[in-house]
Image (tube, coloured by chain):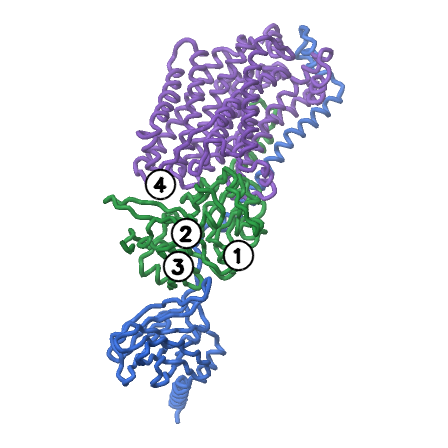
Chain colours: A purple, B blue, C green
Amino acid sequence: MDHRTHELYVDRAMRNIGKTGPLWWAIVAVLGVCVAAAAYAWVYQLQRGLWVTGLNQKVSWGFYIINCVFFIGISYGGAMTSAILRLTNAKWRAPITRLAEGTAVVALLVGAVYPLVDLGRPDRFLYLLQYGQAGSPVLWDFVAISTYLAASIVFLYLPLIPDLATCRDRYKDTARGLRGWTYRFFALGWTGTPRQERALMRGMGIMAVLIIPLAVSVHSVLAWLFAVTVRGGWHSTIFAPLFVLAAMLSGVAAVILVIAGFRRGYRLEPFITAKHFRYLSYLLIALGAGYLYFMVSEYLTEGYVLEAASGPVLEALFVGAYAAPFWGFVIGGLLLPLGLVALPGRYPVARACTASVLIIAGMWLKRFLIVVPGMAEPLMPWDWGLYQPTWVEIAITIGSAAAIPLGLMIFFFFFPVMSVHEMEEVEGVNEPARPALAPAFAGGGDD
Amino acid sequence: MTRPKRSLVLLAVVALALTLASRNDAVVRTVADLLGPRVALFVPARVTLQADPGAAHGGNAAAPGAAAPAAPAVSRPSVSVPSATTTVTVQPGAKLEAGYVLEAKLVMPNGKPLNEAVVRFYEPVELLGDREMLIGSAVTDGQGRASLAYLPARLGGHEIIARSAARDQLAAAEGHTTFEATVAARPYRPEHQPLSAFSAAVPAVVGLIVLGVWGLIAFALFGTARSVGAGARVPVEGRHAQLATAQPRKKAREDLA
Amino acid sequence: MPDKVSRRHVLAGLGSGAVAAGFVPIAFEAAGASHPAATSAQKDRQWAMVIDLRKCDGCKKCTDACQTEHELPANFEWIKVFKIADKQGREYFMPRPCFQCENAPCLRVCPVAATFRAQDGVVLVDQDRCIGCRMCMAACPYGARYFNYVDPPKVDNPFAKPATPEFPVPQQKGTVGKCMFCVHRTEDGKLPACVEACNMLALYIGDLVEDVASNGEETVRLSTFIRDNDAFRYKEELNTGPRVYYIAGHGQQLEF
């Protein structure tokens, strides 16, 4: 990378720090209103109890559990793009890792709040620590999510250290008060010595390797929340891998949307190029194909036998009350977007973004189709349950979805939107010429 | 006498003694008490109650050594109607696991056995109040005997009541007995829970793994922070300072140590 | 992978990462057995029920009695009477209390051991500990648990005792409740509310240890009663070990 490009990169990465504008405020205002509405709805619910939702005795889990799974799935973009691409030495990851890791942390924070929203007695939340039972999937969730959150925050923070040092030095005079102190404190006195570099690389290596099984574990325990019961459509051995793959799919789709948005808003086009969208689309196709395979395997196995428990749910999904959303998901949320990005053609960015929107919407719908028919299916000789979500649940859902871009925008008000250090690392700027461990054909070259 | 012949005679004497002893209840009961309840399977519990002949109320208990519960009064119409005498016995069943045989013998006041009468056997129990549990029913045969197999649910003392309904010219009859059960049904066992050993060990193992993971995260964070912080005190000007000033870097690679 | 991270570190990371992939938390308190709340006074009993479907006429007096006894709202049917139509279209009724399963799924999944088994085999809920996650409701294959979305209707009772798991009256909002075989009544030597209220004498309360069951008037030997009438347990193939036996029937012993 020549010097000019390097400077341009640093400039673009840093230029939005501390800066706002009318468009920025407009977007933040809209998102803020959504988040405020969600907060109001939650307080409303805390005062009155869970009867303000559409939950009832038959369908006792609804939007909140769906959203918990969904938003934690969104956070998998960080593990996928940042960690896996790092371990495979894919050089094209450099401009997008910060955005991906930031999305992961924000989405995880949003998703991790949902079990609290769903509790009947949230004031007793800490009983999980006092009286936690090792055999309960709810406790597995609690431990897995909190560990994954800690790991994600560390995984975001470590590569941020050199950039914080840059900010510290660059804004020595302009940033006073809290911002300046934040830079100084969290930069830990980074000056870029080789020894510090080595320490940082070691820490990042550990986290990159650790965060992948952690991510797998989180969605596996979320799947086991359902799979260890005997309800139809839930008691399936493939649930854990299915959930993990679904999370990765929705995570990569979310990363595509996030980098598209910030690329446009922060003028990152020189560095986040069509190539990124094409490569991420390949990831989408691979993950989507794998997810389709798992789905086919599950439905074939269950549908061939149509046992007493799972038969009615399958019938409802394929031809019954839930047929419209189900086929909408399969066609509109999987086949169509995957076809859209699989076929060669122009407009890779637009196509990737459209496909991502469809995939994310489809993934939410799929979580809905897992939770609600499973709960509504009669276990006893009574009718199917009905679930009609109220404004409280809808407001909280919309608000939490808005909280992700809002959180990201606030985050990137303080911190660089692209990782300078990562770029330098892949470009080999600050290291002596040493052969990379991965050969060029494994992603070493760039175009 | 030769030696083999002597042993044979001895064996015969011992066998005879045992046979005679087993016919003596007192001896056998003593042995049973010494050896414990399970061995006493072989001991018949024979507690017979003789009815008081001519009593209109039916039999009452007069077991050797056992207290006799009074027969409940049967309300009768003004015309004095006799009822059959009921004798209840409890004997061990043919097979060990069959427990006991409850036998009720009904004899009419004229001395003839009462046949084709339905006899119901009850046992007083305490289940949320004092109640009488119906063990079963049997029909008397030509000798006036009705028998029912009974394997009690628990060891210890049991009371058996036999009742027959009123029939033409006979009032309802009742007989009691008590016996000590030395055979009982297998005690209740809850459902088998397989893999319970695993469920105990797995949380501990995985808990250790979780601790290990948190330890690694802490090491990645604080170890790096410490090393970075330590490195800062080394007064080597890193490449980083040049980045901050956004000036063209001339000797990028020379600064590497 | 740039070799700034030594192979040793990679292996260490991979090793611990791979090992962290099997993920379950640290064991805290052991579930069930040592719960601080009191257990039933009848220590040598193992409660069970037998329901004679030949006699049930669907009058729901059992449900009403239970709701009155525990001050429950109208949609809380701890013993619920199902109306089932057979293939010929004839209807019969099946009351379903909580089955107090010996291998209860609800017990396994509770994250705070709010659901526990008393020594007499009855599964109780400690509403002072329940956090309202409703995982037990998802896990119960019989739909026998009910979540208090609202406060129960207020009943003015000057003799009201404080709520315990044996007698969770009044119910707490935000927690889960269910049938507990009226252990608060059996402690006092009284029949459960539903058994006492059933006019058809179709509900029997029994003890598996002493092998006896009673519907208030008739007392039978439990094991013989079950065997002679080919009693079954609902969804027995799930291996939950329910303690409620049904004598198969379609109301054929009703006197009409």
Residue at (45, 28) in percent of width and height: A389
Of residues B206 and C94, the one nearer the viewer is C94
Q: Amino acid at mark 2?
A: Pro
| Label at residue C40 | 1
How far is the residue under mark 4 from the one under mark 1? 33 Å
Location of the N terminus of chain A by quadrant is top right
* Residue under numbered circle 3: C215
Gap in Å between the C-alphas at discs 1 and 3? 21 Å
Instruction: Classify mark 2: residues with Cα within 10 Å, few (<14), some (14-19) or many (20+).
Output: many
Q: Would you name the residue on which mark 2 appears? A: C242
> Looking at the image, is mark 2 or mark 1 nearer the viewer?
1
Mark 1 closeness class: few <14, some 14–19, many ≥20 residues within 10 Å: some
Q: Nearer the viewer, mark 4 or mark 3?
A: 3
Q: Position of residue A359 (x, y in %)?
A: 43, 21
Q: Are marks 4 and 2 on the same chain?
A: no
Label 4 belongs to which residue? A382
Callout 1 amino acid: Ser
Q: Which mark is residue B199?
A: none
- Rendered position, C247 above or below B120: above
Q: Is residue C117 above or below residue A225?
A: below
Q: Earlier in the sequence, mark 1 or mark 3?
A: 1
Characterize the local packing of mark 3: few (<14), some (14-19) or many (20 or more) Cα atoms within 10 angstroms.
many
Q: Chain of mark 4?
A: A
- Where disc 1 sits, the SS reads loop
Residue A92: x and y in percent read 52, 16
Q: Residue A171's spot in the image, x, y percent?
A: 70, 12
Give amino acid for label 4: Trp
Instruction: Depth check: give the residue in front, A349 or C218.
Output: C218
Secondary element at tag 2: loop
> Mark 3 falls within which chain?
C
Residue at the spot 62% in from the left edge and 21% down from the top edge = A159
Horizontal relation, residue B237 to residue C164: left or right: right
